[in-house]
Image (tube, coloured by chain):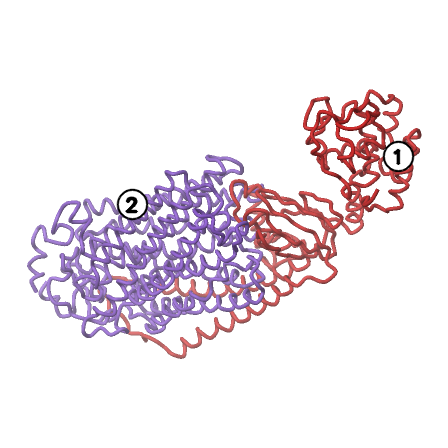
Amino acid sequence: MSSQTSTTAPVQENYLNCSHGFRSWFFTLDHKRIGVMYLASILTMFLIGGLMAVLIRTELLTSGQTVMSAQDYNKVFTLHGAIMIFLFIIPGIPAALGNFVLPMMLGAKDVALPKLNLASYHLYVVGAVICVLSVVLGGVDTGWTFYAPYSTTTNTAVTIITLGVFILGFSSVFTGLNFIVTMHRMRPAGMGWFKMPLFLWSLYATAVIQVLATPVLGITLVLLMVERLMGIGIFDPALGGDPVLYQHFFWFYSHPAVYIMILPAMGIISELVSVFSRKTIFGYRAIAYSSIAIAAFSFIVWGHHMFTSGQSELMNMIFSALTFSVSIPSAVKMFNWISTMYKGSIRLATPMLYALIFMFLFGIGGLTGLFLATLATDIHLHDTYFVVAHFHYVMFGGTVIAFLGGLHYWWPKMFGRMYNEKAGQIAAVIIGVGFNITFFTQFLMGSQGMPRRYYDYVDKFAIYHQISSIGSYIMAIGFFMVAIYLVQSLISGKKAPRNPWGSAALEWQSASPPVHHNFEGDVEVLDPYDYSAIAYDPASGDYVRVGSEVKA
Amino acid sequence: MNMSGFLSGLLASAGKGTPFLAQANGPTVWMPEQAAEKAGQVDSLFYLIFWICMFFFTLLMAVMVIFAIRYRRKEEGEPVEPSPSHNAKLEVLWTAIPVALVLVIFYFGFQAYIDQVTPPSNAYEIQVTGQKWKWSFTYPNGYIDELLHVPADRPVRLVMTSEDVIHSMSIPAFRVKQDVVPGRYTKVWFTPIEPGQFDLYCAEYCGDLHSGMISTVYVHTPEEFDAWIAEHSDVLGSGSLAEGGERIYNILGCKQCHSLDGAPGVAPTFKDLYGSERKFREGDPLTADEDYVRESILDPMAKVAAGFEPVMPTFQGRIKDREITALIAFLKTLSVHVSDEEKEALQAAPAAQAADGAAAAAPADTTAAAETETASESNDEGVKTE
């Protein structure tokens, strides 16, 4: 292969340096560049959302006013939620990491619809700008859920931000649609559905939800805008509307959206656990089917957000029963991941550390969901910090940790540079410890009765809030470390080999970073979890196809 | 609670034989005190789920950590022992066990929930209104308070609505929560088990002062509660007749228009009104006496004071005779036309006696005595007809 010669060249041409200038990036059709732009954008949003989280925790260090007024606090927690969910987590794994690796995992040159892919990114930028504009126009104080009739009567910039979220919805649908088409049309000869890496199965399940559920959010937000702008009564009882209807509409999207956030994370964990244990994934089909099962169940459990809303007892009973069904495929995945480690050759590199942290945190997040699915206990726990802790364990401990794992895993491929491994491990541990200090305390204060979205609190909750805030500072230090060593890696990191972790998946057959069209030559389709085909080559420090060591 | 208290609480509960198990009533690490009958049921279920989760979580994490240590990679490229890629029996087993467990949890949760939402027919009913950012509780006798007073050992049912956005009634010590939605009534019920004070929160975000929408539940013994409600069916309460009158003046909203210091307003000031010469838009002037005051309250349009608009609403049906008596006593204490001796007597007279002994408190006032007789007969009903 021609690649053997090009690796020795001092500066290899790749997708990063093949063309230059703003236009070559902003109007590129290359899925890798779009992925990198998405990555930069969502990390910027994560930074903003994270700063707001630190502000929230700082305000809650003491009861009464600490650093801001109640009105400002309400705007800050609303934007924290809206930014983290609509601008960071939902596009996070699929649009940034997924965009980069999906076509490569299929051995393809690009996604099926590159222009749609670019349009998705442009819509994301427009949506993000509009959302951030709402801050300039006075902020929004409704909470990210925009519950009516509060949202239809408050005089803050609700219409602007809902317009932003509406546009972001299209971006999400475009990405999902593109991925579905790509996986149907562009799998290489020899890669049947059940030969795909599990990350692709999870992206497929995610894409189905994105395409089917997001339009409902769009319609709901339009109805909200219509009520605000034209005074047509849809949700506000003062105008003849029904506020509980809004909750049904909203959660019909937003519950499946939770799985848009967690499914790709589960896909990443399936890859990491297998690669870093050098074991074929245990129960491939069970994991693949469980992704689809979760996507299907996700559409029929939305009512569990509304056990105290006044919906009928019968509805509550049905939704409670259905909600438990989601726990089974999630549990099955956990068992499969841990079984994959059995008799493995486990390397506790940074991505694998994140995978283990994920299993710990997602385990807690998932199990605490049982308390919330159970009717009698949910009545007590609903709208308390117990729920806040639960969804942070799932969304942050789950999705964000898996995102970090995936980012560290694919980083050498994306940028052709290694990062400081020791710093990566230390930062992962700091983030894990800080996370538990921050959010485990919130379980305790929640079950004691502390309501969520409170600017102020009664004395008995002070100690919990203080511990939680300290934890958030520890986490912030961890993230600061990650930012520093990743930037350092871009500037002066060691050159990454093609396949530093020893994966058999196709994306690692490309150069690091890949060339403009991904692969220099033909791609050899392998079983993504057959590690006997890949062996370590001590001479190059790289993993290579068995039989090709001699050439190196 | 301070840091050391928090830690010693954790340690103390961990030191006991059954560290996290719910004890009767007292707070545990996870749950606040149990102050209502169904709280114990919720807590038992919580701890059942808790222990199931603890068992499986500990098991899984132990296996994960053992694998991560035992099978740690010693050097790159070391050979890997083969192991199965799947195992149908094992996979069915670890699907079936969680299915069975969640079915059990669902069943108990559902059963306890149905108990929670089915009130007994003899529940004591209190109407609740949520609005930005306060609660108001209306008792069966019409008394309104911002605090929730309830009897112990008796089922209490709250019938709730909101005047603006969605609020949520949350009383952690009772383990109850129910959204309070504008445009409809939602209900919640509980049976408090022992006297005490408990926090009551708004749990659904409702704007600027959401975190200030906190009230207190006072649980009284049944006897104390009866006494409390009796005291509050009677706005006059204890204290003198004139003090009772002053309370009425504040509660019924007289103060919005009638000043006490002679300042002009929408309506004539109450200062020096009693016993003074009154002029009207129509008809002859007269001296303000008990009958005039009574007529002005019940039929304000009969004689409209000169220089004022006819804007006063009637209080017919909203005020009891003895409350009018008390109000008159209050007016007398403000007037220069009443002797100091009589004022002192009015200020000393217990209001509770207004019903049966107003004549003794104001011997010169035969009208009042006659009226209070009527009041006794009508037995606390507001005056319907004149």
Residue located 8% across and 57% down the image: A6
Front in this rendered view, residue B368 or B7: B368
Image location (x, y in percent) of residue B206:
53, 46
Q: Colour of chain B?
A: red
> Is residue A88 rendered to the left or right of residue B59?
left
Chain on which label 2 sits: A
State whether residue B102 is above or below residue A438: below
Disc 2 element: helix
The N terminus of chain A - image quarter = bottom left
In the picture, the disc for residue A483 is 2
The crowd level at tag 1 (other Cα within 10 Å; few <14, some 14-19, many 20+) is: many
Q: Colour of chain A?
A: purple
The C terminus of chain A - image quarter = bottom left
Which residue, given by chain and number where applicable, does mark 1 sit on?
B368
Labels in figure, total: 2
> Is residue B184 rendered to the left or right of residue B256?
left
Disc 1 element: helix
The crowd level at tag 2 (other Cα within 10 Å; few <14, some 14-19, many 20+) is: some
**What is the distance, in whole Å, between disc 1 and disc 2 at their CAs?**
84 Å
Residue A195, image quadrant: bottom left
Question: What amino acid is found at the position of numbered circle 2 in the picture?
Answer: Ala
Marks 1,2: beta carbons within 8 A: no
Front in this rendered view, residue B90 or A85: A85
Image location (x, y in percent) of residue A277:
30, 65
State whether residue A107 is above or below residue A414: below
Question: What amino acid is found at the position of numbered circle 1 in the picture?
Answer: Ala
Image location (x, y in percent) of residue A213:
38, 62
The answer, for residue B240, to whether it is visible in the render is: yes
State whether residue A348 is above or below residue A197: above
Front in this rendered view, residue B18 or A91: A91
